[in-house]
Amino acid sequence: MFFGGEPLSNLPLIKQVVTYAEQRFAGLGRTVDFSLTTNATLLNEKTVDYLNDHNIGIAVSIDGPPAYHDRNRITVGGRGTYDLVAEKVKLLKARYSARPVGARVTLTRGITDIEAIWDHLFNTLGFHEVGFAPVTAGDVASYNLSGDELATVFANMKRLGEKYLEAALDNRSIGFSNMHQLLTDIHEGTRKVLPCGAGVGMVAVDHAGGIDLCHRFSGSDMPHFGEVNKGLDKTGLNQFLNQRLEQRNLGCNSCQIRNLCAGGCYHESYARYNDPLKPTWHYCELLRDWVDFGIYTYTQILAKNPGFFARYLSPRRAHYETSQSA
């Protein structure tokens, strides 16, 4: 996964990695999958065609209509980038066909209107899916949602989830990827012992070659788990993950959503408690309520339109399992 800053600011490196990986995995009789999260500003016809030819999945970082997007996504000269990004989205729709294109929305302080953002990105710009990532533990405190705002975000996600349910019972998808992911986990019987694939199925590499637990730790003070030129510190990763498993005894083992949460995001804990091993206690009630809503939604669809899962969730998994996160 090619992920920010802005990956397309170093397109030659992307091409070098893709060429190497394609040849390397072909020689092993394996396949390799690529995805890219981009703000779209550097896209052009030649680049789009390259991404399409190599089946590189694309997610566009866009925060909604101009009033929201242009608050934070600005040029070095201070101008909003919405108009430019919207034009690039049109270019993608015209030339790119490898996979469905999703939108990745970053919710910062003062931005909680989930439904309006989804409506613009799904119905106006035509993204296949729209996913929301609330900022609560960013390095710049002024971007972080307040506690009340975070509660509002979850309440508004449930309101959009009600629209999702209404559409699902009518055998339609409204492309709300957070709900898609939650229902997929429930439908597939996911049982997490760790909160995500960080350190297990994925690591992140920073600009200098340091290997981090995930992209959110790049640039932080947390020690690396190896370096590209020296290799992965598997012993250190194993020790870290085993310590996190032991921390689940601090309330997680008796929680009803433990198999879908497993203690929450490492970086959220690192930012809040200066300890990535602690569960995200500050999130617990909101997550329990969200998962309870997901279970309710799932049972309604299962009872009234069970074919929805085969029609929308299974194909969605194939397209998005490596390029989207909830």
Image (spheres, helix red, strand yellow):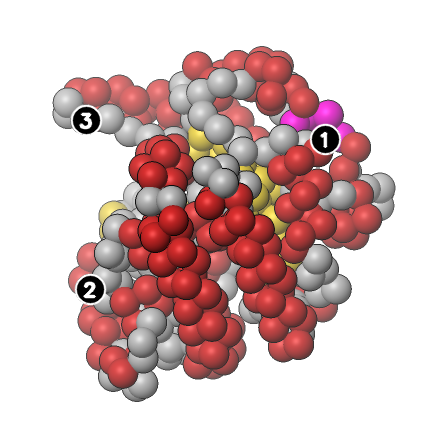
Give the residue pinned by disc 1.
Answer: 86
* Residue at screen point 40% across, 56% down: 300
Image: 248 above or below 233:
below
* Principal secondary structure, stretch drawn in magenta: helix
Outermost residue toward the left in this view: 28
Q: Is residue 162 left or right of residue 261?
A: right
How far apart are the alpha carbons under marks 3 and 1?
Answer: 37 Å
Task: Identify residue type, mark 2.
Answer: Asn
Q: Is residue 85 magenta?
A: yes
Q: Position of residue 283 (x, y in %)?
A: 48, 75
Region rendered in magenta: 84-89
Task: Identify residue type, mark 3.
Answer: Arg
The image quadrant where one finds the N terminus is top left
Count residues near mark 2 (Cα–Cα under 10 Å), then give few for <14, some for 14-19, many for 20+: few
Give the residue pinned by disc 3.
Answer: 30
* Residue at screen point 31% across, 56% down: 186
Count residues near mark 3 (Cα–Cα under 10 Å), then give few for <14, some for 14-19, many for 20+: few
